[in-house]
C-alpha cells in the first residue's frame, strides 16, 4: 500500500474544522486537473494499473466519498479512464470506468492529508529494477 501526502493551506484547514464541511468540494479543489496534486495522484494510479501496459490516466472522478469530522478519517473511490500503450507492438487500448479505492487521514496541525492507496495495489518491488 502506497501513501501520498497532500499539503493543505490555512483556508482548507479552517474548512475542515467545521462539522458541515463539504469534503466533495475540498477534494475537487485539491485535485483540479493539471495541478501538482492531480499529477501525483495520477502517477500513483498509473503504478496501480501498470499491469495493463504503459498506463496514462485520461480522466478521474471521485465518488463514494465518506468523511468523519470527529476522527478526520475518510475514504473515496476514484473512477478513471485509462489508456494503455504497448510500445513493442505499437498498440493502444482504452479502458473506461476503472476503479481504485483510497482511504485518507487529515492531520490538521500538520496541515497534511495522507492518502492510502488500495491494499490490492501492488507496491514497487526491487525485482522491478531487473
Image: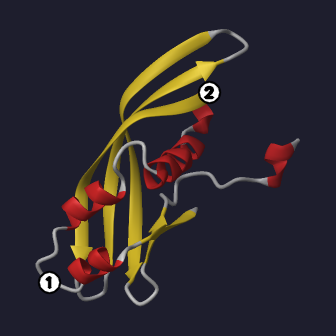
Neighbor class of circle 1 (other Cα within 10 Å; few <14, some 14-19, many 20+) is few
Question: Which mark is on residue 53?
Answer: 2
Which of the 4 quarters of the picture holds residue 81? top left
Q: Nearer the viewer, mark 1 or mark 2?
A: 1
Q: What residue do we see at 49% from left, 52% from top?
A: 36
User: Which quadrant does the N terminus fall into?
Assistant: bottom right
Is 125 in front, or is 69?
Answer: 69
Image side of residue 44 versus residue 13, left or right: right
Residue that carries the numbered disc 1 in the rendered image = 19
Judge whether residue 1 can be spotted in this image. Answer: no
Q: Element at badge 1? A: loop
Q: Nearer the viewer, residue 26 or 72?
A: 26
Residue at 31%, 72% in the rendered image: 74
Q: Is residue 5 visible?
A: yes
Q: Is there a contact, CB below 8 Å, between mark 1 and mark 2?
A: no
Which residue is drawn at the image coordinates 48% and 66% (left, top)?
A: 116
Q: Is residue 51 left or right of residue 103?
A: right
**For residue 18, side relative to residue 119 (left or right):** left
Left/right placement of residue 119 relative to residue 123 reads: left
Give the numbered dot on residue 33.
none
**Numbered circles on residues, count:** 2
Please tell me whether mark 2 sits on a helix, a strand or a loop: loop
- For the C terminus, the image quarter is top right
Amino acid at each position: 500500500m502506497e501513501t501520498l501526502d497532500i499539503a493543505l493551506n490555512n483556508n482548507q484547514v479552517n474548512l475542515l474544522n467545521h462539522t458541515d464541511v463539504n469534503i466533495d468540494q475540498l477534494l475537487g479543489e485539491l485535485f483540479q486537473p493539471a495541478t501538482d496534486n492531480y499529477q501525483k495522484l495520477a502517477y500513483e494510479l498509473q503504478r496501480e494499473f501498470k499491469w495493463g501496459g504503459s498506463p496514462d490516466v485520461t480522466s478521474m472522478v471521485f465518488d463514494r466519498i465518506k468523511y468523519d469530522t470527529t476522527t478526520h478519517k475518510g475514504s473515496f473511490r476514484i473512477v478513471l479512464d485509462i489508456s494503455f500503450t504497448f510500445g513493442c507492438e505499437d498498440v493502444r487500448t482504452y479502458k473506461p470506468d476503472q476503479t481504485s479505492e483510497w482511504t485518507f487521514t487529515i492531520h490538521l496541525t500538520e496541515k497534511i492529508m495522507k492518502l492510502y492507496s488500495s491494499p490490492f495495489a501492488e507496491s514497487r518491488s526491487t525485482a522491478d529494477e531487473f
